[in-house]
Amino acid sequence: MEAVYIIHQGTGNCIVFRKYGDLEFNEDLIAGFLTALKDFSSEVTGGKGKMKNLDMGDYNILLLYHEGILVAGALGRRDDESIAHKALTSVLTEFFNNFKDIVPTWNGNLKVFKGFDKKVDKLTENGKIAEKELLAPFLKKKLPKQIVTMGAITEDEFEFSEYLNGKNTAEDIAEQAGIPVEKVEVMIAKFKDLGFVKFNKL
């Protein structure tokens, strides 16, 4: 995770902020923005849970809400959404275990939350809890055109092989080629089974 925000919905104040990556969002601005989205997120999630894939360019935002508190996580491309959601749920639960009596009448004093940033660090493993390995497939060697004639792969798969350069993940290739990522993954798996590809770790 690139960052975690705990926001008091009533005031729009960011009461805990942890930055783990290169994210350049101002925490107070993003707190105001996410607070403004609270009503929409409640419609989507029924008042609790998560709003999926709030696209902020290079990042996705997961937003959880409970009794006046928003917990948001900025996810990078390496982060697994389901794991991040579990971690943020733990943050929200732990927050209310500590401060449930303070939230309803909170007067704006941030000192009452002092030390909770360390708990956020622990629960998110300093933002690394949801990191997944990114693999970029590449051809071991350029495929001869005759391989299509031999019936090993189709013409479409031969053309697809041009995207396998060791720099792009399946998601990147899907975006570049304009085809579903599921289809990309199937073709990559076939090339792997045929022994045509290796993978770079990004």
Image (cartoon, rainbow, N blue to C red):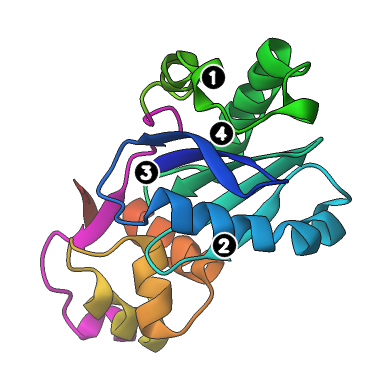
Q: Is residue 185 left or right of residue 6?
A: left
Q: CB atoms at circles 2 and 4 under 8 Å apart? A: no
Which numbered disc covers residue 113?
1
Question: Can you say whether 27 is above or below 97 in the image?
Answer: below
CA distance for labels 3 and 4:
14 Å
Which mark sits nearer the N-terminus, 2 or 3?
A: 3
- Judged by its main secondary structure, the magenta piece is loop
Residue 71 appears at what percent x and percent y? 61, 39
Q: Nearer the viewer, mark 3 or mark 4?
A: 3
CA distance for labels 1 and 2:
22 Å
Residue 53 appears at what percent x and percent y? 59, 60
Q: Residue at x 35, y 81 (%)?
A: 176
Q: Which residue corresponds to mark 4?
A: 83
| Numbered disc 4: secondary structure | helix
CA distance for labels 4 and 1:
25 Å
- Specify few, some or many for label 2: CA neighbours under 10 Å numbering under 14, 14-19, or 20 or more: few
Residue 83 appears at what percent x and percent y? 56, 33
Residue 167 appears at what percent x and percent y? 19, 63
Q: Which residue corresponds to mark 3?
A: 2
Q: Which residue corresponds to mark 2?
A: 33
Q: CB atoms at circles 1 and 3 under 8 Å apart? A: no
Give the residues in magenta: 127-149
| Numbered disc 2: secondary structure | helix
CA distance for labels 1 and 3:
21 Å
Which mark sits nearer the N-terminus, 3 or 4?
A: 3
CA distance for labels 2 and 3:
17 Å
Residue 196 in view (yes/no): no
Q: Nearer the viewer, mark 2 or mark 4?
A: 2
Q: Residue at x 71, y 47 (%)?
A: 50
